[in-house]
Image (cartoon, rainbow, N blue to C red):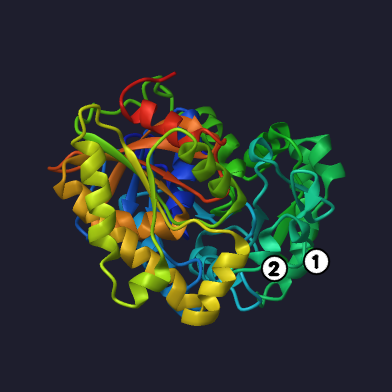
Amino acid sequence: MTNTNAAVGKPLLGCIADDFTGATDLANMLVRGGMRTVQTIGVPDAGARIEADALVVALKSRTIDAADAVAQSLAALEWLRAQGCRQFFFKYCSTFDSTDQGNIGPVADALLDALSPTEGGAPFTLACPAFPENGRTIYRGHLFVGDVLLNESGMEHHPLTPMTDANLVRVLQRQTRSKVGLVRYDAVAQGVQAVRASIDALRADGVRMAIADAVSDADLYTLGQACADLPLITGGSGVALGLPANFSRAGWLADAAADAGALPRVDGASAVLAGSASKATNAQVAAWRETRPAYRIDPLAAARGEPVVEQALNFAREHMQAAQPQPVLIYATASPDEVKATQLELGVAQAGEMVERTLASIARGLRDLGVRKFVVAGGETSGAVVQALGVDMLRIGKQIDPGVPATATLGAEPLALALKSGNFGAADFFAKALRMLDGDAK
């Protein structure tokens, strides 16, 4: 990167995320590096101008048709370029959620094509979903979740994107027209120059995308520095660890703000909504139910036209108006067998949409009851809830658990939100998140 005064004061990094919680995960990493970060919900109007060091456009494109995902991602790229961003990041899940049809490969191809005139030499990008802090590591191109391969981690049962192959070079090659290679761990372990030499060799061999091994945060910092001059980087939020320092070294982020994660205080009641069926969210629901009020919604009852939303809101109202008011959890989280049974009756896509619509309606009702602080579990659920609440921009705050920050809306009606990927967070995450949204950093 070459220093230029023209860059000072403009957004530096423009990010495109394929779901809402992935966007906040990435934004959290950038705030930790001292970058003031704003997340938009969808692509803003062309005339919008936002004061921030990093901008993250949150799409809901992970499981839609690949052509639609490409179109939305290119629209986001066009807006970010108009904001003056100097580098771009395509964020997807740390478990590489996708199918053989996409959407990671097709979107990365399209972004590379759009940015290639700005590159010196052949278009190239890295693909690195590693996030060691949350147990996602890549070795010899194979993705591990904790101590097991991706296809043995429970992700093989994902209702929309079952991951049955841990070899990410193979997975990505099946969904892209680009040649896929690997930046091996032995190169990463030798440092930045060795990674750059590996990239040069891959490019000379016609490779446009390369999976990058990473088993520690130190590896992610190495990869981030090695990619300082790439117009496009793709991956999970972990590889963004090293990006803020690149901008600092170039003199564009001279005063990495100590208060980059400062948020305004939001008053009002609190509630938790959970739609994810992941192992982590199931454990979080179980932990909450041991001591706090919870209400489970039944997607099949909602599909039959039963008043599920009204029943859930009555439950919430009862506890909010009690002599000792308590926040409630309203959830559709279920075991894999229960999810399969619902999908068998409603269809896979219809079952997910029913859960999202129902929780979105409940979120609107909770806001009418005075709830202003929401903890939401699940990427698709989070997307549905923020859209239902009319949220279009979020200022990103401090981290609650790895990958999950507190956030606050920008606009007339202040809301505090914690939007959590289904797989993230400790068992006590819901209670911890509410404390953080209440202003208690402990």
Q: In this image, 184 relative to 80: left or right? A: right
199 up-or-down from 324: above or below: below
Which of the two residues, 423 or 186, is positioned nearer the viewer here?
423
91 up-or-down from 300: above or below: above
Residue designated by label 2:
172
130 up-or-down from 61: above or below: above
How packed is label 1: few (under 14 Cα within 10 Å), some, or many (20 or more)?
few
Secondary element at tag 2? helix
Residue 119 badge: none
Residue designated by label 1:
205
> Which three-letter amino acid code belongs to the residue tagged 1?
Asp
Secondary element at tag 1? loop
Which of the two residues, 111 or 20, is positioned nearer the viewer here?
20
Image point (19%, 38%), residue name: 414
Q: Position of residue 366 (x, y in %)?
A: 22, 48
* Quarter of the figure with residue 325: top left
